[in-house]
Image (cartoon, rainbow, N blue to C red):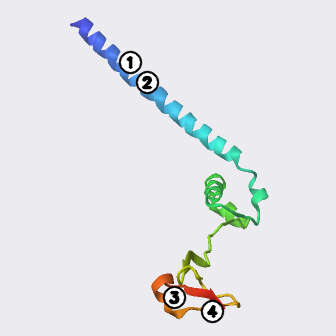
Amino acid sequence: MERKSFLSVFFIVLLVSPAFILAKTIKEEGETRNKRQAQILLPIASYAGLTVTAPVFAALVAAYGIYAVTRYAIRKRRIVMYSDSHSCANNRGWCRESCFSHEYTDWANTFGVCGSYFCCRPY
C-alpha cells in the first residue's frame, strides 16, 4: 500500500509542476511579443502631426497609450467618398455628391439609381 501512495503522490507532483513552468513561460512570451511590437514602430515623435492608417494608429495606441497619441496630434485616416462609384443614365453619367460645373443633374435617374447622390451628366 505504501508503494501505491508513493506512486500516486509522485505522479500528482509530476502533473502539477509543469503548470508553474508553463505559466511563467507564457508570461515571458507575452512580454517578448509586446517588446517586438514596440520595436517595429518608429518613435512616437516621428509621427507627430501625421495622419496614419488604422492598423498603425491602433499599434501606436497599444504601445504608447491614447494620451500620448493625442498629445502628438496623430490622427487616423478617414476614407471620404464623394461618389458611390457607379455610373448612371445608361453609362452616360456618374453618381456624385455634387455635380461639376461642366455637368448637370439628371433628375430622372437620380433617385432610382444613385440613392442619396446626384446623377451627374456632361452637357
Q: Marks 1 and 4: which is nearer the front? A: 4
Few, some or many residues within 10 Å of mark 4 (<14, 14–19, 20+): some
**Pointer 4 residue:** 104
Q: In the image, what residue type sits under mark 4?
A: Tyr
Q: Nearer the viewer, residue 75 or 23?
A: 75
Determine which of the numbered discs, if any, sits on residue 110 in the image: 3
Q: Nearer the viewer, residue 4 or 34?
A: 34
Q: Residue at x 60, y 40 (%)?
A: 33
Kind of element beneath mark 2 = helix
Q: Marks 2 and 3: which is nearer the front? A: 3
* For marks 3 and 4 on the same chain, the one whose residue lies earlier in the sequence: 4
Kind of element beneath mark 3 = helix
**Pointer 2 residue:** 18
Q: In the image, what residue type sits under mark 2?
A: Pro
Asked if marks 3 and 1 touch (Cβ < 8 Å), the reply is no
Kind of element beneath mark 4 = strand
Estimate the spatial distance between the alpha carbons at disc 2 and disc 3, rounded to whole Å.
69 Å
Q: Along the horizontal axis of the image, is 17 left or right of 120? A: left
Image quarter in which the C terminus is found: bottom right
* For marks 3 and 1 on the same chain, the one whose residue lies earlier in the sequence: 1
**Pointer 1 residue:** 14
For residue 12, which quarter of the picture?
Answer: top left
Q: Nearer the viewer, residue 78 or 122?
A: 122
Estimate the spatial distance between the alpha carbons at disc 3 and disc 4, rounded to whole Å.
11 Å
Q: In the image, what residue type sits under mark 3?
A: Thr
Q: In the image, what residue type sits under mark 1?
A: Leu
Estimate the spatial distance between the alpha carbons at disc 1 and disc 4, rounded to whole Å.
81 Å
Q: Along the horizontal axis of the image, is 25 left or right of 60? A: left
Q: Marks 4 and 2: which is nearer the front? A: 4
Asked if marks 2 and 1 touch (Cβ < 8 Å), the reply is yes
